[in-house]
Image (spheres, rainbow, N blue to C red):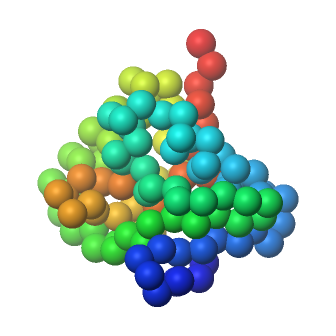
Amino acid sequence: MFDLENGYVLKVAINDWGMKSNKQEYKLFFNSPSLIQKHLCPVIEFGYGWIIMKKMIQMIPLDQEYDIKIAQFIKLFMENGIEPKDIKDKNLALSENGELVAVDYGNFTVIKD
């Protein structure tokens, strides 16, 4: 990941898994309802092997309130047909209004009915 120093980051895929992850982040961000989209780091641009996303500051407090927010975050996604895999502190950030935001969601899976 490269900081573009303009409020955005560039993620460049170095293997097939990275290519799939970038594509999944793009598709998920632009095909999710706003209720879900606000919990996904915004995608600005996407191309073959790269993706540009908003730079998010990852300052997650490790406390009981955080644990509750994580549980609510997972429940919200599951209720909307998305399995949020790979939930780790390094893959999450807080938005300006204190909402959890996934910054790395290439492993999230859309659940088929």
Residue drawn at (41%, 77%) of the image? 7
Asked which quadrant contains residue 19, the reply is bottom right
Q: Where is residue 61 drawn, in percent x and y? A: 22, 68
Residue that extends furthest to the bottom in the rendered view of this protein: 5
Q: Where is residue 92 drawn, in percent x and y? A: 40, 61
Q: Where is residue 25 drawn, in percent x and y? A: 59, 50
> Which one is nearer the viewer's eye here, 96 or 93?
96
Tally of numbered discs:
0
Residue drawn at (61%, 49%) of the image? 26
Residue 50 appears in the picture as rendered: yes
> Which one is nearer the viewer's eye here, 25 or 58?
25
- Left or right: residue 60 versus residue 106 is left
Give the vertical position of 49 relative to 82 (above or below). below
Residue that extends furthest to the right in the rendered view of this protein: 16
Residue that extends furthest to the top in the rendered view of this protein: 113
Q: Where is residue 52 drawn, in percent x and y? A: 58, 66
> Which one is nearer the viewer's eye here, 86 or 45?
45
Q: Which quadrant, please, contains the C terminus?
A: top right
Q: Which quadrant, please, contains the N terminus?
A: bottom right
Residue 67 appears in the picture as rendered: no
Give the vertical position of 60 relative to 64 (above or below). below
Residue drawn at (36%, 55%) of the image? 101
Asked which quadrant contains residue 65, the reply is bottom left
